[in-house]
C-alpha cells in the first residue's frame, strides 16, 4: 500500500516544519 510513501512524505513535512519553527525562533 501507500503507507511507506505516506510515511516518507509525513517525515519530510515534519522535518521542514521543525526547521521552519527553529528558524522563526531565532
Image: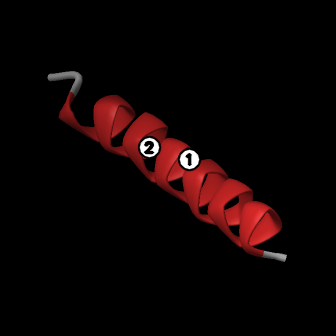
Q: Secondary structure at mark 1?
A: helix
Residue 8 position, x and y percent, is 44, 43
Mark 1 packing: few (<14 Cα in 10 Å), some, or many (20+)?
few
| Residue 3 image-quadrant placement | top left
At 45% from the left and 52% from the top, the residue drawn is 11
Give the crowd class for mark 2: few <14, some 14-19, many >=20 residues within 10 Å: few
Color scheme of the displayed model? secondary structure
- Is residue 3 shown above or below 21? above
Residue at the spot of label 2: 8
Indicate left or right for 5 with 22 as reference. left
Q: Nearer the viewer, residue 26 or 19?
A: 26
- Horizontal placement of 9 versus 7: left or right? right
In the depicted view, which residue is nearer to us: 16 or 6? 16
Tag in front: 2 or 1: 1
Q: Position of residue 2 (x, y in %)?
A: 23, 23
Q: Going 39% across and 42% down the picture, which residue do you hit? A: 10
Q: Which residue is mark 1?
A: 12
**Residue at (46, 35) in percent of width and height:** 9
Whether residues under marks 2 and 1 lie with C-beta atoms below 8 angstroms apart, the answer is yes
Disc 2 secondary structure class: helix
Q: Residue at x 76, y 61 (%)?
A: 24
Q: Is residue 26 above or below residue 4?
A: below
Q: Which mark is residue 1?
A: none
Residue 4 rendering spot, x and y as whole percentages = 29, 40
Examine the rendered structure and indicate whether residue 26 appears above or below residue 16. Answer: below
Spot the residue most to the top: 1
Give the Cα separation between the discs numbered 2 and 1.
Answer: 6 Å
Quarter of the image with the C terminus in it: bottom right
Left or right position of 23 against 17: right
Amino acid at each position: 500500500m501507500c503507507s511507506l510513501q505516506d510515511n516518507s512524505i509525513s517525515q519530510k513535512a515534519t522535518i521542514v516544519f521543525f526547521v521552519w519553527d527553529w528558524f522563526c525562533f531565532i
